[in-house]
């Protein structure tokens, strides 16, 4: 049978060691793949490519549409973009899917029956990477949540649950504080959930959700989260289940998919031959299911489970109470290969069905534009003073046909009626609103900014209201 072309990157740190081990297992396990190797990561960064990837690599990814990626190292300091974020956003990999299971008693954990999946939005939120130095003392990172992006990942989570026999989806946000951004995510979760009456639904604030995940992971089935929370929660879940080193993930879009380990490049143990290849192997198993080779995926997963049962463990999960032999990276790979065709005796054997035909989620239709009316503007200032009354005295004469109604410092109201105890920096916001009955247009805001500039006030940003 023909082999499926895939793009492979060996990465940095422990990446080359674990990728070599995983490819050995895949070949022995009957995976029908034709790897195309690309170079990404630290060496590419240091050649001057700020994204860590060159044009020739993009050509391979767009041709194969399947990416098996080892961990990479991003150089310290400014000027270097996250390659993971770049690939996910450029190729539209909007869903990050991270299954987490416990393998007790063969991998030590306090929790015996963890079997959950985290579905993480992969393109938006604070990971949009839009940051600014606004004043000497304040920097900003923009949190972006869009309705189409949210609806797409919410539908993916519900569809994933439906197609995989999952019973409950838990949405995690912080919408008691971020009422517009996280509030939109939560409201779309409720809205779309009405179309899936057979699936139980719940919402948790992220802090209590993380606490319960650490203490009671058995209560969760599918967890849906925006980008940042999903990243944090998936590491918590993997560690609670036994080790982050055992977790793999799929980054899925409509056209392309990327498969990887959850963990990083671990440069402190690179070259020592002790790294656990299991996380990347779990990603590769998800890849085999994705490309329509579920039999090979199950064969390899069951050999891996049997290896764990037999107590053949790498150093990160070795426990003298349950482990029989401590092995290195290549020895572990060989142990898995030797057990191909076997199944675990106590752990549940793996079974994978064929991939679902077509994309998990159809294209999300765009809504009709909402009616917009300009009613005011927030103007942000770099101002070194400390007394909000003094800033108000400077701003009010420039308001023109608008009214200065509020001044904040770092988002805390300080005028009118502020408290002297409130800590202040050089980051101020003045809110100007249309007077009752007045209509505002963009040229009114331009005129306001002109007056502020003439008055020598250093405005750094505006937000229309």
Image (cartoon, helix red, strand yellow):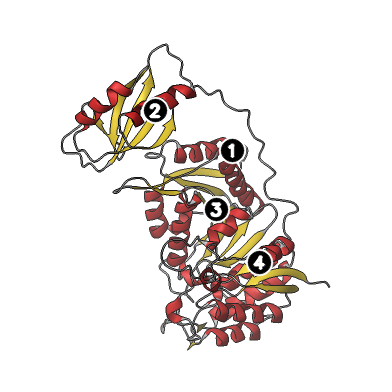
Mark 4 or 3, closer to the camera: 4
For the residues carrying marks 2 and 3, which lies nearer the camera in this image?
2
Say whether residue 17 is left or right of residue 7: left
Q: Look at 43% across and 33% down and name the residue there.
A: 463
Pointer 3 local density, CA inside 10 Å: few below 14, some 14–19, many at least 20: many
Are the two marked residues, 3 and 1, in contact with CB atoms closer than 8 angstroms?
no
**Whole-Å distance between the Cαs marked 1 and 2?**
45 Å
Marks 2 and 4, how far apart at CA = 48 Å
The residue mark sitting in front, 1 or 4, is 4
The Cα–Cα distance between marks 4 and 3, rounded to whole angstroms, is 21 Å
Q: Quadrant of the N terminus?
A: bottom right
Q: CA distance from mark 1 to mark 4?
A: 37 Å
Residue 122: numbered disc: 3
Cβ–Cβ below 8 Å for labels 1 and 2? Answer: no
| Residue where numbered disc 4 is placed | 57
Under tag 2, what secondary structure?
helix
Q: Earlier in the sequence, mark 1 or mark 2?
A: 1
Residue pointed to by mark 2: 450
- The residue beneath circle 1 is 192
Which of the image's four quarters has the C terminus?
top left
């Amino acid at each position: 049978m023909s082999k499926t072309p895939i793009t492979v990157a060996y990465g940095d740190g422990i990446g080359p060691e674990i990728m070599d081990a995983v490819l050995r297992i895949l070949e022995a396990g009957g995976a029908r793949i034709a790897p195309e190797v690309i170079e990404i990561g630290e060496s590419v960064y240091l050649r001057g490519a700020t994204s860590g990837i060159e044009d020739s690599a993009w050509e391979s990814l767009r041709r194969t549409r399947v990416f098996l990626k080892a961990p990479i190292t991003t150089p310290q300091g400014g000027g270097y973009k996250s390659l993971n974020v770049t690939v996910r956003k450029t190729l539209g990999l909007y869903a990050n899917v991270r299954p987490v299971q416990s393998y007790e008693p063969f991998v030590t954990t306090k929790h015996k029956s963890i079997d959950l999946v985290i579905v993480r939005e992969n393109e938006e939120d604070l990971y949009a990477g839009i940051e600014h130095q606004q004043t000497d003392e304040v920097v900003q990172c923009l949190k972006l949540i869009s309705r189409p992006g949210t609806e797409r990942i919410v539908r993916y989570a519900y569809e994933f649950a439906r197609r995989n026999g999952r019973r409950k989806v838990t949405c995690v946000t912080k919408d008691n504080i971020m009422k517009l951004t996280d509030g939109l995510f939560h409201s779309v979760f409720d809205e779309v959930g009405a179309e899936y009456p057979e699936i139980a639904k719940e919402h948790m604030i992220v802090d209590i959700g993380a606490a319960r995940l650490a203490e009671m992971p058995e209560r969760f089935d599918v967890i849906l989260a925006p980008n940042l929370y999903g990243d944090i929660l998936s590491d918590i879940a993997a560690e609670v289940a036994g080790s982050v080193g055992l977790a793999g993930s799929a980054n899925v879009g409509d056209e392309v998919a990327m498969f990887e380990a959850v963990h990083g490049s671990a440069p402190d143990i690179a070259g020592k031959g002790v790294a656990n290849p299991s996380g990347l192997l779990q990603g590769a198993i998800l890849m085999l299911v994705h490309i329509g080779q579920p039999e090979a995926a199950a064969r390899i997963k069951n050999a891996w489970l049997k290896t764990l049962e037999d107590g053949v463990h790498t150093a990160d999960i070795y426990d003298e109470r349950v482990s029989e032999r401590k092995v290195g990276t290549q020895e572990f790979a060989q142990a898995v290969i030797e057990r191909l065709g076997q199944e675990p005796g106590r752990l549940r054997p793996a079974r994978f069905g064929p991939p679902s035909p077509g994309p998990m989620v159809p294209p999300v239709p765009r809504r009709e534009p909402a009616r917009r009316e300009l009613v005011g503007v927030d103007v942000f200032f770099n101002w070194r003073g400390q007394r909000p009354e003094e800033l108000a005295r400077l701003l009010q004469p420039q308001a023109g046909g608008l009214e200065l109604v509020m001044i904040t410092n770092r988002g805390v109201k300080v005028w009118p009626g502020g408290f002297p105890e409130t800590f202040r920096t050089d980051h101020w916001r003045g809110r100007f609103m249309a007077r009752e009955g007045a209509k505002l247009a963009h040229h009114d805001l331009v005129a306001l900014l002109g007056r502020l500039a003439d008055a020598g006030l250093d405005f750094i940003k505006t937000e229309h209201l």
